[in-house]
Image (cartoon, rainbow, N blue to C red):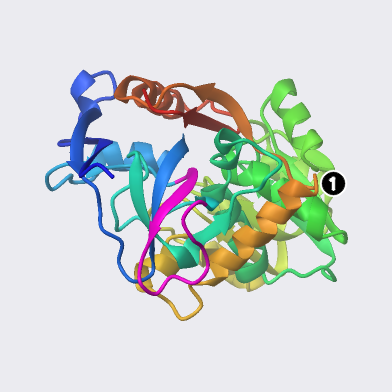
Amino acid sequence: MSKATTAIGYHKNLPVSDPESLTSQQVDVPVPGPHDLLVEVQAVSVNPVDVKLRAGASADGFRVLGFDAAGTVRDVGANVTLFRPGDEVFYAGSIDRPGTNQQLHLVDERIVGPKPTAVSFADAASLPLTAITAWESLFDRFGLTSQSSGTLLVAGATGGVGSVMLQLAEALLPGVRVVATASDAERERWVRELGAEEVVNHHADLAAQVLDVAPDGVDWLFTAHSEGQIETYAQIVRPFGQIVAIDDGPRDVSALKPKSIAWHWELMFTRPLYQTPDMIEQHHLLNQVSRLLDDGRLRPTTTRTLTPITPETLREAHQQIEEGRVVGKIVLHDWP
């Protein structure tokens, strides 16, 4: 195996229009730690976190971005038990390690799942980060089970996480009625195809629309865009209801107190960042996601593919996400 591999990253924070905002260079092939897999990356997808880091996070040298990946295991660490060389895998990595935008990449086996056989590497790469986030929101933060009943509002339903959450609710939560937000006819079709039973337009009077379809309020509210929305959420969530948010920034949630509404943050990097005792749960949930894909109960959320994986195609994907109009996921596959 070569001693160097191609990686794409940044040295300093620059506008995506600048050719130096993402560049390619040769880096040493990383050596697996005890629980690591060395993966030959065949496809990646781009998430809002990539854009946020490129624009504002210190590089401290050359920082390689990318979280979602699908590829083939080429080497394993001494204590690896879950995979072996030749296995096809998919995963979302960790924010405290070099990213997946490189041909050979290290990842802890405990946050990796077997690639579903029914879909391509490109489509598999559309799912890990969003599927983990959606799964942990529904089943860990909300604590939902197959016996749960009530109404779930998914705000930001056309994004990557929302697009998976709608499908997981449809497949695994038969007693949960799902209301999704969408801003136009195209997006309404998208969320209905993925399992939404009711659709409301978040550009109009959200509270009035939600209370029209759920007069007593919703039991659970997932949000990708909570800033400036807390007062509205206080109106539309029932007493003792729950909210999960995945966006950033401090929030004054005091308006939720009269109804004793619970507020949860969800960050899918928490388990690998803190090496929590239950870190392997991400492996287990990706196993289940893989089976759902192979059974046809879950579908990839790819809406655009770019090839090959280069600084130019990655900059194009970043620009589209910055413009805020992406439905589903942008995926890149194959190296030059």
> In the picture, residue 5 is in which quadrant?
top left
Residue 16 as seen in the image, left or right of residue 292: left
Residue 79 part of the magenta-drawn span: yes
Residue 10 in percent (x, y) is at 21, 35
Residue 299 part of the magenta-drawn span: no
- The segment highlighted magenta reads 68-86
Q: Is residue 119 above or below residue 83?
A: above
Residue 225 as seen in the image, left or right of residue 171: left
Q: Residue at the location (56% across, 24% down)?
A: 304
Q: Is residue 14 above or below residue 56?
A: above
Residue 77 in percent (x, y) is at 36, 66
Q: Is residue 35 above or below residue 216?
A: below
The three-letter code of the residue at mark 1 reads Val
- Residue marked by disc 1: 213
Q: Residue at the location (63% across, 54% down)?
A: 222
Q: Residue furthest front?
A: 1
